[in-house]
Image: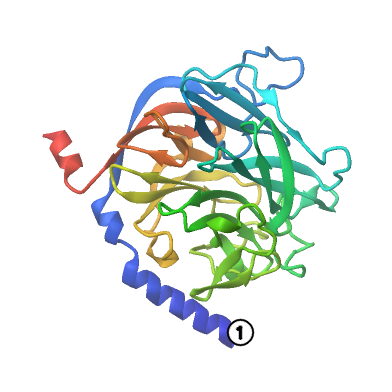
Amino acid sequence: MKSYAVTAVWLALMQSMFLGSAEEQCSVAIKDAELIEFPGVVETGRDPQSAGVVDCNSPAHWAGDTMYLFNSAAHPFRSSGPDVFHLSRPATRVTFDNEATWTMGARWIEATHQADDEVLYMWYHNEPPVIPSKTAPRIGSMISKDNGLTWRDLGIVLEAPVDSNNLESVNFYFVGGNGDFCVVADQTHEYFYFFISTYNKVMREQGVSVARMAYNDRDNPSGKILKWHEGEWKEPGVGGQVSPIFPAAGDWHSEGVDAFWGPSVHFNTHLNQWVMLLNRAKDKNWAQEGIYISFNEDLSKPVEWTKPTKILDASQLKKSKWYPQVIGLGKQETDKLAGKTARLFVAGLSKWEIAFLRSGEEKRQGQ
């Protein structure tokens, strides 16, 4: 308890020093736009040209003049096209090298990165069976040399401590775990940063947390990821503790959940800053309270993420869905890179255009 008290005081002090600087300089403007829906995963018996299910972040990358996008619903599917407005339908099921022997639950593609040698790296959310109807997610890594049509599994790279599940949890889905995440490489390709949702049984480790891995370790990631804990990159990716950058305000394992989760991060070239979008759960069934945004100039400084600000209320969403993200509109822009104007998606549906504004730009637009 003494250690936790010191950590909490330290975190509050650091947040009070940093939160708000980028927030004062950046804002967004959202306006209605023509409806776009990702191809998604079309259920058996439905029109294959219809919009399917989108059940996590949907990463994209470019190979030449072709954009590739992954949607997942217990298994990933891939679509492609000249831009986000013209993706192929229906999406194609991707394959994993170990599907025949895999017994540890469903897998969702949540993040991708294309290296300069055109090798594609991917990180997946996995839900192994823990108790009947509930799980504790974990994160694995894969690699592809055909733009993500076939994948080779590199194993689990991020997992909560073995004693961190709450088997009595009233949460509808989870008893613990690390999952619902995104991954981005910094601009110099020194590190990959993992922004993960953490559901440990103790509240001090619940929220949105961060870990990182040296970029050069991408082909052999086992044991190479370090979680940010008590101000340092020091805890192992598998089994290590975390200090959330956005701690839960209401216990994930109680009736009264109040927590940010499911981060999506991109670098915004207009702002010259990193931008994070977040869900906010308000009960044990994960009812959506709204979509939030945060900014940071330096990924290596987790405490400098600004206080999340609401940009969409749940009432503005179709069935109050989850998984906010942007897709940039320029060539080579994706869910990880965007400029001043992008499309805002929630659960694979976009009826909004989002503009990222520097200090003073919003005022000029209104004149």
Residue 244: % across, % down: 53, 65
The image quarter in which residue 31 lies: top left
Q: Residue furthest bottom?
A: 2
The image quarter in which residue 243 lies: bottom right
Q: Which residue is mark 1?
A: 1
> In this orientation, which residue lies closer to the viewer: 203 or 73?
73
Q: Is residue 210 left or right of residue 294?
A: right
Residue 91: % across, % down: 65, 22
Q: Amino acid at mark 1?
A: Met
Q: How many dots with numbers?
A: 1
Residue 258 appearing in the image: no
Residue 92: % across, % down: 68, 23
82 w.r.t. 280: above or below: above
Q: Residue placed at 50% from the left, 49% from the top?
A: 184
The image quarter in which residue 19 lies: bottom left
Q: Residue placed at 80% from the left, 45% from the top?
A: 105
Q: Residue furthest front?
A: 117
Q: Residue furthest left?
A: 367
Q: Is residue 10 left or right of residue 76?
A: left
Q: Quadrant of the C terminus?
A: top left
331 w.r.t. 125: above or below: above
> In this orientation, which residue lies closer to the viewer: 157 or 340?
157
**Callout 1 crowding tier (Cα within 10 Å): few <14, some 14–19, many ≥20:** few
Secondary structure beneath dot 1 equals loop
- State the scheme by which the image is colored: rainbow
240 w.r.t. 284: above or below: below
Residue 264: % across, % down: 50, 46
